Image (cartoon, grey):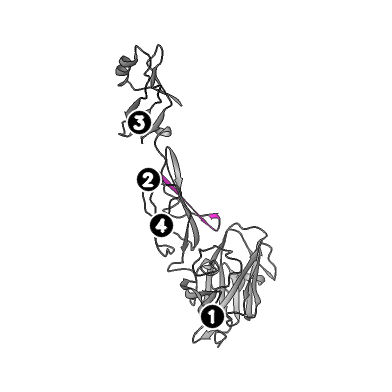
């Protein structure tokens, strides 16, 4: 690497006096520069040192390395470390700020990105600021499972975080009508012994069919193929309205739900609708099934586009609710104790 050092007027008289006769310095040289912003840049040559250009006042250095915060685009070190962690405060809900923190050295800006099921999303305090200061207060207005990432930069390079999965629940004042059941333990096969996640938020689809065990990571809609969660307590007179987001799936994606015989519960009504608690299927005949027994019978069948009386049509980049309730609020079983019953609903899908 060769670089011409100009505009060092305060250094030139002394350097010229030293090197003027020889025209070169045959040794490694370090020049310490300080900018008007009080940042530093160290210029270190190779063993050839500095050469005074013939007939001029320019100095030429070969084999140069630069270090420090004041070297512009060619100096200093990029932020560290790469693949850093994002730490999210517990249990975010819509409308309430949650914090995201990180540790990075040497960054001057940090740019956040967010997606929900593969579609770009905007989060106040995350995607609209570039401050390198941690933590940030972030607000989500839509419930769902988000993937966050952060890229921190300076003039010498950048470092990018590992992705962080953030499940944002619906806060108070949501748009679901009265009677929504919001919390239950969920059991996963094999049983016994029971594999249980406790006090699960039922308002988000991903929390239910986005898992296949008690300790795996969440898989956003369409979730885990073959997942068979047993919602352990649903009120006989209540319903589950589980929000999910259709991003940009394959146009050939299709799937369905099954009211299975193991972990059996009472007959079910199910609908997929853009409205929480709507058991009409939003006017689509294929989006609602009523009085389905727990004997392995199919519930709602869905696909991308092309609605029919059998297939429920889903549109990309749209929020939906999977609404579930017991067909008979006075049912006594199977799987019922007091005012509550369990239900096992299997999730099937394919491309």
Label 2 element class: loop
Q: Quadrant of residue 310?
A: bottom right
Residue 297 % position (x, y): 66, 77
Residue 256 % position (x, y): 64, 69
Please tell me whether residue 51 is drawn above or below residue 84 in the rendered image: above
**Which residue is label 3 attached to?**
42
**Which residue is label 1 attached to?**
342
**Which residue is label 2 attached to?**
105
Residue at left 42%, top 65%?
A: 91
Q: How would you rate the neighbour count of disc 4 (Cα within 10 Å): few for under 14, some for 14-19, many for 20 or more?
A: some
Please tell me whether residue 167 is drawn above or below residue 23 in the rendered image: below
Between the residue at mark 3 and the residue at mark 2, the CA separation in whole angstroms equals 20 Å
Between the residue at mark 1 and the residue at mark 4, the CA separation in whole angstroms equals 35 Å
Between the residue at mark 1 and the residue at mark 3, the CA separation in whole angstroms equals 70 Å
Q: Which residues are magenta?
A: 106-119
Marked residue nearer the N-terminal end (3 or 2): 3
Of tags 2 and 1, the one toward the viewer is 2
């Amino acid at each position: 690497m060769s670089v011409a050092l100009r505009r060092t007027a305060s250094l030139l008289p002394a350097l010229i006096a030293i090197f003027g006769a020889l025209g070169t310095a045959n040794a490694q040289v370090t020049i310490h520069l300080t900018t008007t912003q009080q940042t530093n840049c160290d210029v270190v040559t190779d063993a050839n040192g500095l050469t005074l250009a013939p007939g001029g006042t320019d100095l030429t250095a070969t084999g140069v390395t630069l270090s420090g915060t004041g070297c512009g685009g060619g100096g200093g070190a990029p932020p560290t470390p790469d693949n850093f962690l994002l730490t999210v405060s517990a249990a975010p809900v819509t409308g309430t700020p949650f914090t995201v923190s990180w540790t990075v050295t040497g960054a001057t800006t940090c740019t956040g990105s967010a997606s929900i099921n593969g579609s770009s999303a905007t989060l106040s305090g995350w995607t609209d600021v570039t401050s390198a200061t941690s933590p940030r207060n972030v607000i989500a207005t839509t419930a769902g499972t988000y993937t966050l990432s952060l890229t921190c930069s300076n003039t010498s390079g950048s470092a990018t975080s590992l992705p962080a999965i953030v499940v944002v629940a619906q806060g108070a004042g949501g748009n679901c009508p009265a009677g929504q059941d919001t919390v239950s333990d969920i059991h996963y096969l094999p049983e016994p012994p029971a594999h249980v996640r406790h006090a699960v938020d039922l308002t988000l689809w991903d929390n239910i069919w986005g898992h296949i065990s008690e300790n795996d990571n969440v898989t956003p809609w369409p979730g885990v193929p073959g997942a068979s969660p047993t919602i352990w307590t649903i009120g006989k007179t209540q319903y589950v309205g589980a929000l999910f987001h259709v991003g940009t799936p394959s146009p050939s994606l299709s799937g369905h739900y099954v009211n299975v015989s193991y972990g059996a519960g009472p007959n079910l009504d199910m609908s997929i609708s853009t409205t929480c608690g709507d058991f009409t299927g939003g006017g689509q005949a294929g989006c609602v099934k009523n009085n389905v027994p727990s004997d392995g019978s199919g519930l709602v069948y869905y696909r991308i586009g092309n609605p029919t009386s059998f297939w429920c049509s889903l549109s990309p980049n749209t929020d939906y609710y999977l609404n579930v309730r017991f067909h008979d609020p006075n049912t006594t079983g199977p799987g019922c104790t007091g005012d509550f019953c369990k239900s096992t609903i299997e999730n099937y899908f394919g491309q």
